[in-house]
């Protein structure tokens, strides 16, 4: 019955493509979380009346974030082809998609981090400063713990967006379910292949969203 509904689906290829999508999303999400968190903290601390208040650094960092956040992902992939080829020696495969995925997602998440940090009660930060806490201590003991639910919620949204990015990256040969849906499904007029790839993408998204919501609820002490 199942094979009759999806006669053109090669389940081996579908499984491999699903693994590639999960791999690209997982690696890009981890690196995006680290980079986005660092950039977001720099944006926050260099803003007015903060510990590292510096208008020039804040402006330059914010400008770079806005530039890369504004470029459509499919255009960003094309722009980064020379860089990707220089870095990895190829523009095909799951690993070749990672530079574009990370550069596309990190600025987006950095803005979410900045918003989360701005929601922290200023009194808590001032109290830590008045007790002589070092900047590193304030970051570890105040900023990150106080904003953790928002940070996790933000990286969940980013991870879901990255799943969509991997699908777009698949169009230029990065692998994954997007690549399979385009090459084996769309170009060969195999609707069942495209449909199954879409269903699996949705399943991955729902799982990410569920895990993110679960962790957010667990760490939210409000």
Image (cartoon, rainbow, N blue to C red):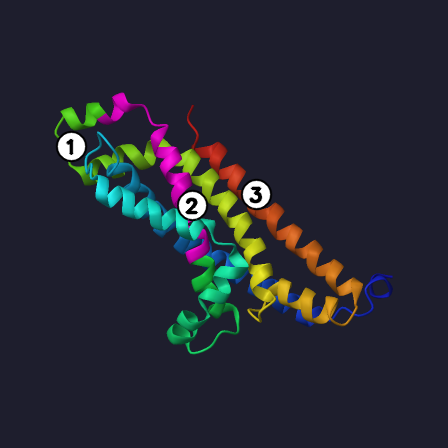
Dominant secondary structure, magenta: helix
Residue 215, position in %: x, y? Answer: 48, 38
Q: Earlier in the sequence, mark 1 or mark 2?
A: 2
User: If the image is split into quadrants, where does the C terminus sit?
Assistant: top left
- Numbered label attached to residue 209: 3
Is residue 202 found inside the magenta-colored segment of the image?
Answer: no
Q: Nearer the viewer, residue 133 or 56?
A: 56
- The disc placed on residue 98 is none
**On screen, residue 101 above or below 183:** above
Tell which tag, 3 or 2, sits nearer the viewer.
Answer: 2
Count of numbered tags? 3
Q: Which residues are magenta?
A: 103-125
Q: Is residue 208 above or below residue 214?
A: below
Q: Secondary structure at mark 1?
A: loop
Q: Secondary structure at mark 3?
A: helix
User: Mark 2 sits on what residue?
Assistant: 109
Residue 200 place in picture, x, y as percent: 67, 56
Q: Which residue position holds label 1?
A: 133
Q: Quadrant of the N terminus?
A: bottom right
Q: Nearer the viewer, mark 1 or mark 2?
A: 2
Task: Tell me the CA gap for discs 3 and 2.
Answer: 16 Å
Query: Nearer the N terminus, badge 3 or badge 2?
Result: 2
Q: From this viewpoint, which residue is outermost toward the bottom? A: 89
Q: Which residue shows up at 69% across the image and 60% down it?
A: 197
Identified at 74% across, 67% down, the residue is 185
In-front residue for pair 34/51? 51
């Amino acid at each position: 019955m199942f094979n009759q509904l999806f006669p053109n689906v090669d389940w081996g290829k579908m499984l491999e493509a699903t693994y590639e999508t999960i791999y690209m999303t997982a690696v890009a999400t981890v690196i995006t979380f680290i980079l986005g968190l660092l950039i977001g903290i720099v944006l926050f601390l260099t803003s007015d009346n903060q510990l590292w208040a510096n208008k020039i650094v804040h402006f330059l960092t914010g400008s770079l974030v806005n530039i890369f956040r504004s470029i459509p992902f499919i255009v960003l992939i094309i722009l980064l082809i020379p860089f990707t080829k220089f870095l990895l020696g190829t523009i095909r495969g799951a690993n070749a998609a990672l530079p574009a995925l990370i550069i596309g997602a990190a600025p987006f998440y950095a803005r979410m981090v900045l918003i989360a940090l701005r929601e922290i009660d200023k009194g808590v930060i001032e109290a830590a400063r008045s007790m002589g806490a070092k900047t590193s201590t304030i970051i570890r003991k105040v900023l990150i713990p106080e904003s953790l639910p928002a940070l996790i919620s933000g990286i969940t949204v980013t991870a879901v967006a990255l799943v969509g990015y991997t699908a777009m990256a698949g169009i230029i040969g990065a692998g994954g379910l997007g690549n399979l849906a385009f090459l084996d499904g769309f170009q060969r007029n195999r609707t069942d292949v495209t449909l199954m790839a879409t269903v699996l993408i949705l399943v991955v998204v729902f799982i990410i969203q569920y895990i993110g919501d679960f962790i957010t609820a667990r760490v939210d002490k409000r």
